[in-house]
Image (cartoon, rainbow, N blue to C red):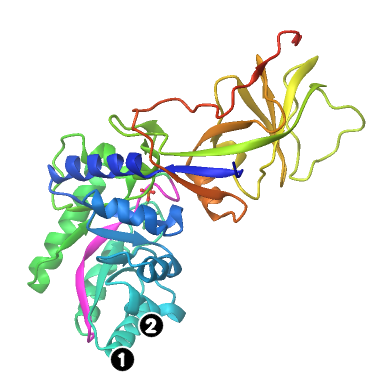
Amino acid sequence: MIAPRLEIDLEKIKVNARTLVKRLALQGISVTAVMKATLGAPEIANALRQAGVKTLGDARIENIVKMRHRGVPGPMAMIRSPMISQAARVVKYAELSFNTELEVIRMLSAAAQIAKRMHGIVLMVELGDLREGILPKDLHGMVREILRLPNIALKGIGTNLACRSGVSPDAVNMRELSALADSIESTFGFPLEIISGGNSANLAWALSGANTGRINNLRLGESILLGCDPLQRQPISGLHTDAITLVAEVIESKVKPSQPWGTIAQNAFGAPSTPKTHGHIQQAILAIGRQDIDPLGLEPPQDVEILEASSDHLVVKTGRYAYPVGSEIAFRLNYSALLRAMTSPFVSKLWVNRTPILQSPPTLTKKPRLVSSLQEK
Ligand SMILES: *Cc1c(COP(=O)(O)O)cnc(C)c1O
């Protein structure tokens, strides 16, 4: 079978999305599914729609355009502040965009007038993580300016935490967002439809049973795709953590010394890690590399250990088994590895739809040969 490949189980992704949509609905919170790690894959977009997700979001307009051209229905949101150079495309393809700069919103207004349509705006507020966001003291002034702009509808406010500085969403910063919504409404006298509290990192807070205040939307990517809470990288109960797996093929399999010999300098990517083992090991090379994955973001099967990766080679140590040339090894991925694998043209995408088994371990696709003579000191 073609390798390397991502095996993407649409049923498991659907279960993850439906579970989160239902749990959050109990708190009055809707889900915007964030597609950016999938490059806007229409197969996944359609699965998410079937799971009850109303709005799809993406940080790249190209992904939104792709979903539209492939017939994905329903509202779409541009969740990164649009580039001025892309204003016309954003207005054409997305109903909503998340913004922090008046110049950009002015351009969206101009583009929306030309296109003769309304464009919705959510203003992102800075609450400590120091990525995108308007400082709370500047928010009212910004709202006043936006209300004057033709063809622009101010739909709400939002915030994004835990992405740059790892600031956790908690009762304090979420209460501040709720209070900002209240103060805009009372000052300007109109209701805000969307109070978007954050991303997958908000789930622990949102599902803790705490008062969620005015927050009525979350933008979820990683938790839907990987079933994982990004704050502690722990599995979320009831969700599949193996909806997407990476399969790579062995191109060399040999018993080799674990320590290199010769004069040691840097390798292609900086200082090589010093091997911890001595003596001989069963070593395998997989035909995949840093161009396709983040080697630190792969979780190998139990008796496989990742030793090093270069552009095109992933070197692993295998324990009791020797993986013959041509056999395959399946890995789970974290967000970083998923993002790169999805983006690599060398990794093919296989849509699978196996019967869901909750949090099953990755399985080997070919049975490895047991090497009993292997000596390890
Ligand atoms: C990527 C992104 C998200 C989704 O984050 P996850 O951790 O994958 O849930 C939400 N909001 C914004 C603004 C983003 O850029």
Q: CA distance from mark 1 to mark 2?
A: 9 Å
In this rendering, does residue 219 appear at all? no
* Few, some or many residues within 10 Å of mark 1 (<14, 14–19, 20+): few
Residue at the farthest front position: 1
The percent coordinates of residue 228 (x first, y second) are 37, 36
Q: Is residue 63 magenta?
A: no
Label 2 SS: helix
Amino acid residing under circle 1: Ile
Range drawn in magenta:
149-165
Quick check: 179 left or right of 269? left
The residue under the point 87% across, 33% down is 264
Q: Is residue 164 magenta?
A: yes
Of residue 169 and residue 216, the one placed in the foreground of this image is 216
Residue at the farthest right position: 262
Q: Is residue 170 above or below residue 150?
A: above
The percent coordinates of residue 279 (x first, y second) are 80, 14
Picture quarter with the N terminus: top right
In this rendering, does residue 252 appear at all? yes
The residue under the point 57% across, 38% down is 247
Which mark, residue 88? 2
Amino acid residing under circle 2: Ala
Of residue 168 and residue 310, the one placed in the foreground of this image is 310
Instruction: Please identify the quarter of the rendering in which residue 204 is found.
Output: top left
Of residue 326 and residue 200, the one placed in the foreground of this image is 326
Of residue 265 and residue 130, the one placed in the foreground of this image is 265
The percent coordinates of residue 346 (x first, y second) are 62, 52
Q: Is residue 114 above or below residue 2?
A: below
The residue under the point 60% across, 19% down is 303
The percent coordinates of residue 143 (x first, y second) are 22, 74
Is the shortest distance between ligand 1 and the CB of mark 2 under 8 Å?
Answer: no
Q: Please give the residue where the numbered disc 1 appears in the rendered image.
A: 114
